Image: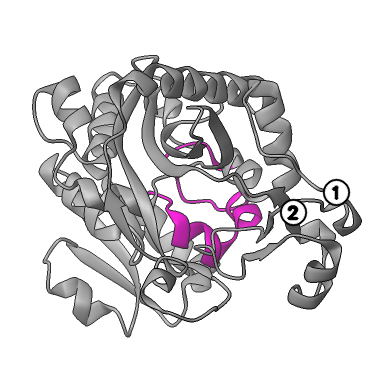
Amino acid sequence: MVIGTLASHSALQIMRGAKDEGFKTLLVCDRKRKKFYERFKLADEYIIVNEFREMLNEDIQQKLIDKGVVMVPHGSFVEYVGAKNLLEFKVPIYGNKGVLEWESDRKKEQKWFKRAGVRVPREFKDPKDIDRLAIVKYEGAKGGMGYVLVKSEKEFQEKVKNFDREKMMIQEYIVGTRFYPHFFWSPLSDENELMGMDIRYEANADGLSRVPIDLPPTYVVTGNLPVVMRESLLPDVFDLADGVVRASQELFYPGLIGPYCLELVCTDKLELFLFEVSARIVAGTNVWIPGSPYTHLKHGKDISTGRRIAMEIKRAIEEHRLNQVIS
């Protein structure tokens, strides 16, 4: 078996983890990026495309199938190829293809959270209802691009262009500390593991404190920073994560498989609000290569999320349970 992915996002981590567990590796790579990825010598083979959407072409899919590739999805994978297109993708994919559509569809995501019984920010169904600070978000894995802060309908009309209610969400902006805990749900062990935690560095929102003038913030993610949450909050985080997994199994069986990320805000009252879930490996896991304090506590050694994926696939092969982790 060969473990593959698209040459972007967390590809280096996925390749390193696969190599550490003895797998052959493959990258679907555009021509401009190949030189960069060759520097790390982590891919045993490349399939070169002009743009990532070419991965949907039947000839590319057949090449991957013939080589025995299992593709690992990540944020760029979902954004460039499309969650709905992946439902028709014939190459084996690690995890549950169906979960990616629930992640990228705001309405389905809110239904998921409601079933999980978690605390979420208020959603404004109509711009006329905005009566406090709110954030306007667009669907898909775009790294925060296009997000806008508004505090009234008037501001909404001034700042938001090409309004399409079906493709955006208007959500109360909760003031607090952002945390992005990375989890791994193993159907083989029937267990939730905390792999690490990060916060996102956003331009220009995180750079405005250095500028003595009034500028509107933007939320494009440019990097990630490692963070460790106070230990007394972790039981609540695990309860929240367990609820999200349970609800996923009820709504789109077999639900979440492998890595996922909860996007949380913690208020000064120590209340946790869930505002999004990423149902695959996130770029923030890159700050915990080769491993985090949590994986060291759990396993007694350093394990990145990329390596944990490879470990799960390896175990599934050995136990003849590959159908439980691949779709």
Residue tagged 2: 170
x and y, in percent, of residue 292 in the image: 19, 37
Answer yes or no: is residue 254 visible. no
In the depicted view, which residue is nearer to us: 128 or 136? 128
* Disc sitting over residue 36 in the figure: none
Q: CA distance from mark 2 to mark 1?
A: 7 Å
Look at the image and tell me in which quarter the N terminus lies. top left
Looking at the image, which residue is at 44% across and 43% down?
Answer: 177
- Of label 2 and label 1, which has the lower sequence position? 1
Q: Position of residue 241 (x, y in %)?
A: 48, 25
- The magenta span reads 71-97
- Asked whether the residues under the numbered discs 2 and 1 touch, taking CB atoms below 8 Å apart as contact, a structural biologist would say yes
Residue beneath the point at 23% across and 51% down? 287
Residue 318 locus on image (x, y percent): 23, 23
Depth check: give the residue in front, 49 or 76.
Answer: 76
* Residue 116, image quadrant: top right
Residue that badge 1 annotates? 125
